[in-house]
Structures are given as structure tokens and as C-alpha cells.
Image (tube, rainbow, N blue to C red):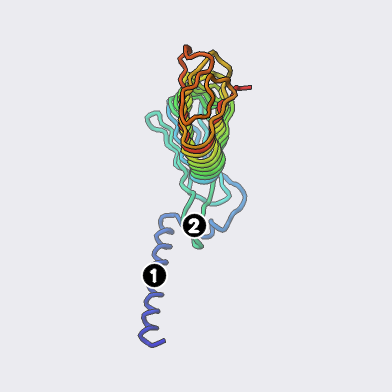
Amino acid sequence: MTNKTGQIVRIIIASLAAVAFSVLLVLGINGRLSLPSFFRKGEEHMITSVSRDASGIRDIQIDWRAGRVEVSKSADGNFHAAETSRYDVDPMLCTSDGGVLKIKQQTGFGFFFFGFGSRSSTLTLQLPEKEYEAFQLKMSSGEGDVTGVNAVSQRFELTSGDLRVDTLHADSLTAKLTSGQMTGTGISAQKLDTGITSGKLSLSGAFSGITAKCTSGRITLSSSLVPDALDVNIPSGNVGVSIPDNDGFVLEASKTSGDIRSSFDLLSPINDKSGRYVYKSDAAGRSYRVKLTSGDFTLDRTE
């Protein structure tokens, strides 16, 4: 190696080292880098807790990036929010203004000395038992358990992880999954809107209207009510819907590839590319639509 080449190499190495040091310095100043905290994964401990009167709270918004979320009923008229972690993390932001309760995790994913990682934490939220106008939970990764929420509008977004819901009451309930799994029982909703990019979603309850879009993965829905409307779009994947026996419906079906099956005795066999299929009578006014590009759709009786 010539002196000139060696000098160029040293300049490049020094430049890279300066850039790396600057990045680490900025991350440290912004609280995104804490080597001792990152490596010190100790016992679960309290990060912060908040308890306030919830009489004026109408809207609840939760944004949690990594860890666990537990939502249940409060025994009094206050909401109680607590964050715990095995790391020394920045405390969550918890604000209540204009009737809107916002809880946002400040830790989660970030750059550490040896690359990309996460320092997760757990949110435990207890809410007074009343009807709210809206409830929204957005999770990037982790696990969640939500029980006993009564809100006119409810929305759940999961990028990755495992979310379980139980005993929810809503006029409109939306569940969107990028990946991961969501399961739920005891759900009551006038309108259920589900969509997954990949993963599994399984919900059971009483639904008056159902919309489902499955890009990949599987959606399983079971309703104790006969829905007045059903709209299913399957670019790819599998969707199964179970409903009680009833006095009739019309199924408008179209498919490019895949199978459409039903345990109901339809007046026309489902084996064409498209068609209008009637169960018992079309006088009941129930119109169901299925568009299948690839995959499978099943419509069965609820047992």
C-alpha cells in the first residue's frame, strides 16, 4: 500500500468514526441511547402511574409500540394508568384534555450501540364502567388484553403481535392487522369491519353488519345474529363466516380463482365464476356479497 493510499484509507476511517460518534452523541442527547439501561434487564419495576377523575373522559387513544397492554374495568370513578418495565425507560405520555385521554409509549424501538432493538414496557389501564364515544388501541408489537370496553366507536390496529379482546360493546368496531393474531369473544357490534394483510383474526359475538378484507392469512367470524349485510373481499387468503339459520338471503358471488362453499342449501350450486345464489327466499332483504380473487370463502351455520 502506497503512502497516498494509506492516507486515503485513514481519512475514510476517521470520517466514519466521526459520523458514528456524532450519531451516538445525538441519540444520547435525545435519550434514545442508554447503554447501561439497555444491558440492565432487571426486575419489573414501576416507571410511572397516573390516576385521575374520568367523569369528563369521552375518547380514549392508546399508542403502544413494544411490550404489553392490559385494559380492564376500574372499581371506582377514576382511570388508573401504570407503566412498568424491566428496563429504565422514559415514562409514557398521559394527557387528558377536552375529554380525550391520550396515552403514548415513549420507549420502544430505537438504535442502540450494537444495532436496532427495543426496550419494551407494560401498560396497565383501568377504566370506569360507562359508555365512551371512542376507544382506539394502536400497537406496533407485543401482546394485548382488552376486556369490558363499552364505546360507540372502537378501533384496533396491530402491526405485529398477539391481541385478545373480550366483552366489547360498540356501534362500530374496526380491527386491522398487518401481521400477527387477534382473537375475541363476547363482542357486540352493529357494524364490524375487519381487514388483515397477513396473520389470523378470529372474532365471535353478535354482529348486524360485517365487512371483511383478507389480503393474506385467515379471518374467522362467528355471529349469533343474522347480519343484514355481509361484504367480503379476498385478494388472497381464507375467510370463514358462521351465522344462524334464517328465513333467507341472497349471495352475490364472483371469483377468479379459489373456492366458495356453504352449508346452507342454496338454490344454485356454487361452482361458476360468478352468480346470484338464493337461500330460501330473497324476500328477507338480506344481501351478501363476496369477491374472491384467490383463496377460499366459507359461509356456514352457527352451531
- Residue matched to label 2: 116
The residue positioned 47% from the left and 27% from the top of the image is 253
Quadrant where the C terminus is found in the figure:
top right
Q: Amino acid at mark 2?
A: Phe
Query: Residue 72, how many percent across, how many down?
Result: 56, 31
> Residue 18 bears which disc, if any?
1
Q: Position of residue 199 (x, y in %)?
A: 54, 41
Identify which residue is drawn at 49% across, 57% down.
116
Numbered disc 2: secondary structure: strand
Which class describes the residues within 10 Å of circle 2: few (<14), some (14-19), or many (20+)?
A: few
Q: Position of residue 167 (x, y in %)?
A: 57, 26
Q: CA distance from mark 2 to mark 1?
A: 20 Å
Total marks placed: 2
Q: Nearer the viewer, residue 154 or 218?
A: 218
Q: Residue at x 47, y 44 (%)?
A: 105
Q: Is residue 114 above or below residue 237?
A: below
- Up-down relation of residue 241 to residue 124 (above or below): above
Q: Nearer the viewer, residue 119 or 116?
A: 116
Across and down, in percent, residue 59 comes to 43, 29
Q: Quadrant of the N terminus?
A: bottom left
